[in-house]
Image (cartoon, grey):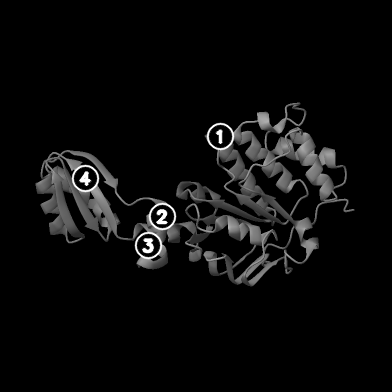
Amino acid sequence: MSTSPPAPPPQDRTLIEVDSVSKWFGDLVAVSDVSFSIGPGVTALLGPNGAGKSTMLRMLCGLAAPSSGSVQVLGRNPKTDPSVMRHIGIAPQQEQVFEHLTALEFVTMSARLHGVADPEQAAAQVLQVVELDPTDPRKLPTYSKGMRQRVKLAQATVHGPSVILLDEPLSGLDPRQRIHMVELFHRMGDEGRCVIVSSHVLEEVERFGSNILVIAQGRLAAQGDFHGIRDLMDDRPRRLQIETDEPRALAGALLAQGFISAVELVDTASVVLDTNDVRAFSRAIAPLARDIDANLFEVRSLDESLESVFKYLVGGR
């Protein structure tokens, strides 16, 4: 039995190596030829629902084997080397929990399975870290969604793992709890641990850190810091609808600027346009409306869903 959590790895060490990994279930390809390497710190796994994020996390923690390619965590295969599980913590998106257990009992059980010395004390401490009362006598099914999310994080970290995999961990949390959780992720990353946080919400990912893996349709669509990927998304072609009392005049003024590729007058109060330079449009729209004495009531994107963004990143450029 281990008597203490494993020491965090050096900051410059590669902790996860994924090489040409694919995973299919019959005719369904969930992950297709994905390669990346990750070191300590917080990494966001960003993609729409059904993109392959959860499948990738399952392969990283050894719950599923790649159909082809290789996964290495701390230099070992998590599917065939059970010893590496001592260094991995996972909080799945699913919420199957033991109904007859309190939070303390549930996290204590996880600590005991990982060989943590004084498991109940370790469980109590980590529950306090996620702002839950370890003396709460209620059973887990009575907890709110946000409370259950924090219990899952507690059981994933009670043994001090070097690699922490979190599948949609902010779902169900209120704004203050989200801020606290993100701060906790960064604290663990600063300790030299590798924290992978999956999400389908772009605004959430901005808070996680600079390293982002974008997965769409089972493929790695982009990798890099948030600002670079945000720029890549912002630079894609965009369809916008403008509500104004002068749609024809405003459409003509925008066309004259040269960054509008198509315009359609929808009715007497709105116009739809296509642009390849949304930044130039954003800078120009208010001054142009002022110059022609037009009132702007609303400007909105018609293709702002993550699915459309990721489709562009994968194959639309």
Q: Is residue 124 visible?
A: no
Residue at image coords 55%, 37%:
172
Residue at the spot of label 1: 176
The residue at 20%/50% (across/down) is 272
Question: The residue tagged with tag 3: helix, strand or loop?
Answer: helix
Tell me if 151 is positioned left or right of 115 in this view: left
Q: Residues within 10 Å of mark 4 (few under 14, many from 20)?
A: many
Q: Earlier in the sequence, mark 2 or mark 4?
A: 4
Give x and y (percent) for residue 214.
49, 60
Task: Give the foreground label among 3 and 1.
Answer: 3
- Image quadrant for the C terminus? bottom left
Q: Residue at x 55, y 65 (%)?
A: 31
Instruction: Tell me which amino acid carries mark 3.
Output: Tyr
Q: Please state the horizontal and vertical placement of residue 207, each as a whole percent of the image.
A: 52, 48
In the picture of the structure, the residue carrying the numbered disc 4 is 242
Residue denoted by label 2: 307
Q: Earlier in the sequence, mark 2 or mark 1?
A: 1
Instruction: Determine the secondary structure under disc 1.
Output: helix
Disc number lying in front (2 or 4): 2
At mark 2, the secondary structure is helix
Q: Secondary structure at mark 4?
A: strand
